Image (cartoon, helix red, strand yellow):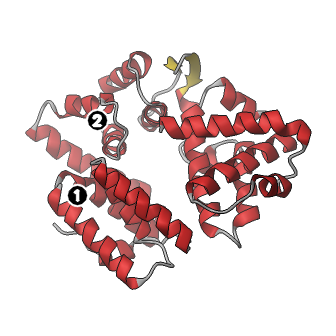
Amino acid sequence: MVISESKLNGASKHNVILFPKTYEYYQMELTRLLESERYAEAVGLLRFLLQCDGEDEGSRMEWAALYEWLLQAFPHLEEIEEQHIHRDTLRSDEMDEEPETEQEVLKTQMRDKLRLDNQYIEKLLQTLRDEQLDERKWLVLEQLAVVDDESLNDELIYMLETEKLHALIQFGLLQTLNRRGTTGAVTYFHGNEQIVVDIEHTPMDYASFPYVLQIPAEKVREASAVREPSLAYFSQEMWQQFLKAIYGTTLYDRLRDSNEHDCQVWAAALHRIVAGLLHLEEEETEVKRIYNISTDQRIPYEQALRALANSLRSG
């Protein structure tokens, strides 16, 4: 199977325009991923880039050719892309029917795979134990969510409680357990911090997080939507990943109790970090001015910068 750009264009387009500096950053990022043989992440980045506007036709053709070559060279990546394209197409065509349709497709696929391989569940669980964070794991979690076996709930809880997992995988397991109808408290270590959360309260999408937690990214969007659309988009993406990575921790609880001044501090830090990643020329003094960061807020601002930077490194 070859997944062409025409298939990608059938999926919903991102509302993002690539400016020259942003384009240069992604060219370097793509090169870095390929040189380190992180092919699943490279395919994901190419999928995103092919859904953006602003790049010249020659670059688009190069990206499309590289995208298809990677899928042909590494056939296991095709299954991941099929899931993405199938999901995006459903969102684009029939939003109201997506959950039922996608779930039924996944259930059918899982029944077929389990019939052919009675060790398939264990192989999926072993993939989650692998320390490398890649897109295979999100496909695994989607598959595990529809397995018709209640005993799997206990296995997933045991893995969460005993295995050393990436924070995003821990959150993904909570979402998977929630989707499977599991309820009750679960205790596990997030780094050196022991946390206790109720599975049924796990946010299932960004909109499900308490509104106060969405305010910093919203402030960045308001400040940059016109002059730097890519900054507005990637700030929300990074903030969403950050919330998932700190879910259930004392830092998450502090953010949930934020006031207006706290939200301004975190918005400024988020703006600064993402602007740096995109190689945008944003002076720190200007960022502080945009969000009204006073001298008295210097320490909270620097703490927010460190927290976001640490989350990025661990990801």
Residue 159: x and y in percent read: 37, 21
Question: Between 51 and 117, which is closer to the camera in this rendering?
Answer: 51
- Which structural element holds mark 1? helix
Instruction: Characterize the local packing of mark 1: few (<14), some (14-19) or many (20 or more) Cα atoms within 10 angstroms.
Output: many
Please tell me how many numbered marks the rendered image carries: 2
Residue 56 occupies quadrant: bottom left
Q: Is residue 68 left or right of residue 278?
A: left
Q: Is residue 250 left or right of residue 193?
A: right
Q: Amino acid at mark 2?
A: Asp
| 211 relative to 66, above or below | above
Question: Between 17 and 33, which is closer to the camera in this rendering?
Answer: 33
Q: Amino acid at mark 1?
A: Glu
Q: Residue 78 — which label?
A: 1
- Which structural element holds mark 2? loop
Which residue matches tag 2?
Answer: 148
3D distance between C-alphas at marks 1 and 2? 25 Å
| 176 relative to 10, above or below | above
Quarter of the picture containing the N terminus is: bottom left
Question: Does the rendering let one see residue 64?
Answer: yes
Residue 67: x and y in percent read: 28, 66
Residue 279 occupies quadrant: bottom right
Residue positioned 45% across, 33% down in the render: 181
Residue positioned 40% across, 15% down in the render: 162
Q: Is residue 41 left or right of residue 72?
A: right
Residue positioned 86% across, 42% down in the render: 261
